[in-house]
C-alpha cells in the first residue's frame, strides 16, 4: 500500500524523547464554521477499549462530535462515523480491537460513506498502523492520542475529500483545556489531573503512547470538580498514570496531597484516584486520604511482582521490602482501607523462586482485589528484547495459581462485611435482574442488593447478607423497614 505524502505516521523512537521544556497549555477551542454543521442528520458510535484515560478521551471525542451536530447512535450499523478508541497495553487487547475492526467490514460494504476511525494507544504503534494500512481498507481514519482536538478537521477531510487520512503525532504532548465533553455517566465522572508517564517501566508501552508527564493546573481541576458538583455528580475519580507525580512538572508549590485536600474541600461526596505508583507515595498523601471522609478508603497500588530482582528488571524503583513497608503504613494509617493491585506473571526469565516471592507477597498483603496478567512483549520496550525461555504453558500455570491464591483472600475479606451495613452509591438496576440494584461501597466493592424506590445516584445503606469473591449481596435497609 502506498503511503500518502500528507500522512503522519507514528515513530516510537521520537515518542520516547523527554526534554526539560515546559509543555504548551492550550485553553482555546473553537469550531470553525466549515466543520460546525457537518454532523447534521448524522450519527456517531464510539467503541472504547482499555483504561479510564481512554474512557475519558472517548468522552472528549463524543463532546467534539456533539459540537459538530452529530448525534449518538446505539449501534455501529446505524452510525455514519464509528470511532474505535484502542488500548495497546497487551497483545490480547490489540487482538480484540482488530476483531472489531474486522467485523465492521460488513457494515462498510453496505455503506461506503461510513467513516471508520481507529484512534488511541494502538494508533501510536508503528507496526499496527502498517497492518491496518495494508489489511483493513475499511479504516479510513487513524489518529493518535495527541491528535484528538483536531478531529473536526480530520473528519472533514475524510468525509468531503474522500481521503484516507492518518495523523499520528509522536511527541511529549500538550495540555488542552476547554475541549468539549460528553460525559457518559450522570453520577460518576472522570477528571484528568495529569497526562502521560515518565516512569518507563521496561515492559510498558504507555510512556510511548501517551507522552510526557504533564499536570493540569490545580485551578483548572478545581473548576471542573466544582462544576461537576453543581451538576449533581456524586463521585469523581482523579485520573493519571501516576498520580503521585502530580504537580512535579509545574513550577508550583503544590503536589498530589495538596490537590487531594483541595478537592476534598469542595465537598463533592466521593473522591477516588487512579493510579498510584508505590514509588514516591508520600506520607502527606496517606494523611490526606485518612483525614477527609469524602476521599474513599481505597488505594490501587500496583505491585507487579513480589521479587526484588524482577522489580529491578522491570524498572519499578522499589523493592519487595519497601512495597511491604508502604503497604503496612497505608493499612495502619487509613482505617478500613481496601487495597488492590496489578501483578504480571512470566516476566522474561522469571524463575519459580521469583514467582514464589510474588505468591508470598500476596499471602502477606491479602489484597482486596488483584488484576493479574501474563507478561506480553510490547515492541519498542526494553523488556521485549530480554531473553525469555519460560514457556507459555508455564506462565499460564502460574497465572492460575496466582488467581487461586488471591481469590481466596478476596472472599475472606468480603466475608468480613457479612452482617454489616455499607453505604452504596447506586449505579442503577442490575442488567440481569431489574429488581436488583448494583453499586459500589466506599472500599470499591461491588454490591448487588434488593430494595424499593431506588434510583441511580442514590446513597443507600445496604445490609450485607452474603459475600462472594467479586461482589456481595444484600438488602437496602429502608426496604427492610418498609416491609
Ligand atoms: N504485559 C502484561 N501486563 C502489562 N501491564 C502493563 N504492560 C504490560 C505488559 N507488557 C499491566 C501492568 C499495569 C496494568 C495497567 O497493565 O500490571 O499496571
Ligand atoms: Fe506503564 Fe510503569 Fe507508567 Fe504505569 S508507571 S503507565 S506501568 S510505565
Image: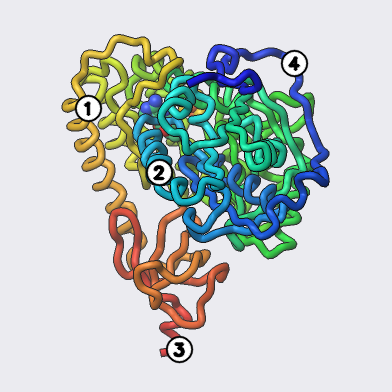
Compute the Cα span from label 3 to label 1.
53 Å
Q: Secondary structure at mark 3?
A: helix
Compute the Cα span from label 2 to label 3.
48 Å
Q: Which mark is residue 21?
A: 4
Compute the Cα span from label 2 to label 4.
39 Å
Q: Is residue 15 left or right of residue 258?
A: left
The crowd level at tag 2 (other Cα within 10 Å; few <14, some 14-19, many 20+) is: few
| Residue 334 spot, x, y in % from top left | 51, 46
Q: Is residue 418 left or right of residue 278?
A: left
Which residue is at the front of the view, 325 or 455? 455
Residue 289, visible in the rendered structure: no
Q: Of the two numbered discs 1 and 2 on the same chain, state the one appearing first in sequence.
A: 2
Residue bearing mark 3: 482
The response on whether ligand 2 sits within 8 Å of label 4 is: no
Residue at 53 percent of width and 26 percent of height: 124
Q: Of the two numbered discs 1 and 4 on the same chain, state the one appearing first in sequence.
A: 4
Residue bearing mark 2: 100
Compute the Cα span from label 1 to label 4.
42 Å
Q: Of the two numbered discs 3 and 1 on the same chain, state the one appearing first in sequence.
A: 1
* Residue 120, above or below 433: above
| Residue 276 spot, x, y in % from top left | 53, 35
Residue bearing mark 1: 395
Amino acid at each position: 500500500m502506498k503511503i500518502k505524502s500528507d500522512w503522519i505516521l507514528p515513530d516510537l523512537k521520537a515518542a520516547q524523547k523527554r526534554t526539560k521544556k515546559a509543555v504548551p497549555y492550550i485553553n482555546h477551542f473553537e469550531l470553525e464554521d466549515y466543520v460546525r454543521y457537518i454532523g447534521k442528520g448524522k450519527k456517531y458510535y464510539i467503541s472504547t477499549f482499555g483504561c479510564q484515560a481512554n474512557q475519558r478521551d472517548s468522552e472528549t471525542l463524543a463532546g467534539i462530535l456533539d459540537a459538530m451536530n452529530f448525534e449518538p447512535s446505539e449501534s455501529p450499523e446505524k452510525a455514519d462515523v464509528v470511532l474505535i478508541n484502542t488500548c495497546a497495553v497487551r497483545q490480547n487487547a490489540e487482538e480484540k480491537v482488530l476483531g472489531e475492526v474486522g467485523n465492521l467490514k460488513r457494515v462498510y460494504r453496505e455503506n461506503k460513506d461510513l467513516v471508520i476511525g481507529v484512534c488511541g494507544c494502538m494508533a501510536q504503534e508503528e507496526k499496527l498502523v502498517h497492518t491496518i494500512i495494508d489489511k483493513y481498507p475499511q479504516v479510513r481514519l487513524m489518529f493518535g492520542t495527541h491528535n484528538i482536538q483536531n478531529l473536526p478537521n480530520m473528519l472533514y477531510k475524510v468525509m468531503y475529500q474522500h481521503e484516507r487520512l492518518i495523523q499520528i503525532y509522536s511527541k511529549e504532548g500538550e495540555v488542552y483545556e476547554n475541549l468539549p465533553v460528553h460525559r457518559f455517566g450522570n453520577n460518576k465522572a472522570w477528571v484528568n489531573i495529569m497526562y502521560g508517564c515518565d516512569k518507563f517501566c521496561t515492559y510498558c508501552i504507555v510512556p510511548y503512547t501517551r507522552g510526557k508527564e504533564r499536570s493540569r493546573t490545580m485551578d483548572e481541576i478545581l473548576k471542573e470538580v466544582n462544576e461537576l458538583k453543581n451538576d449533581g455528580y456524586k463521585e469523581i475519580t482523579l485520573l493519571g498514570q501516576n498520580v503521585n507525580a502530580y504537580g512535579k512538572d509545574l513550577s508550583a508549590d503544590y503536589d498530589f496531597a495538596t490537590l487531594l485536600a483541595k478537592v476534598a474541600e469542595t465537598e463533592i461526596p466521593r473522591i477516588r484516584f487512579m493510579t498510584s505508583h508505590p514509588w514516591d507515595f508520600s506520607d502527606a498523601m496517606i494523611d490526606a486520604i485518612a483525614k477527609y471522609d469524602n476521599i474513599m478508603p481505597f488505594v490501587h497500588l500496583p505491585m507487579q511482582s513480589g521479587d526484588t530482582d524482577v522489580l529491578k528488571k522491570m524498572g519499578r524503583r522499589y523493592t519487595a521490602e519497601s512495597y511491604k513497608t508502604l503497604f503496612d503504613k497505608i493499612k495502619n494509617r487509613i482505617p478500613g482501607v481496601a487495597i488492590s493491585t496489578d501483578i504480571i506473571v512470566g516476566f522474561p526469565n522469571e524463575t519459580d523462586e521469583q514467582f514464589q516471592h510474588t505468591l508470598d507477597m500476596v499471602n502477606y498483603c491479602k489484597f482486596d482485589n488483584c488484576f493479574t496478567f501474563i507478561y506480553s512483549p510490547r515492541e519498542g520496550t526494553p523488556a521485549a528484547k530480554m531473553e525469555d525461555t519460560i514457556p507459555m504453558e508455564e506462565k499460564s500455570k502460574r497465572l492460575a495459581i496466582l488467581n487461586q491464591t488471591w481469590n481466596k483472600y478476596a472472599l475472606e475479606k468480603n466475608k468480613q462485611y457479612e452482617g454489616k451495613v455499607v453505604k452504596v452509591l447506586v449505579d442503577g438496576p442490575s442488567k440481569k435482574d431489574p429488581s436488583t440494584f448494583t453499586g459500589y461501597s466506599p472500599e470499591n466493592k461491588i454490591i448487588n442488593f434488593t430494595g424499593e424506590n431506588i434510583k441511580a445516584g442514590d446513597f443507600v445503606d445496604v445490609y450485607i447478607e452474603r459475600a462472594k469473591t467479586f461482589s456481595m449481596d444484600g438488602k437496602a435497609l429502608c426496604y427492610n423497614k418498609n416491609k
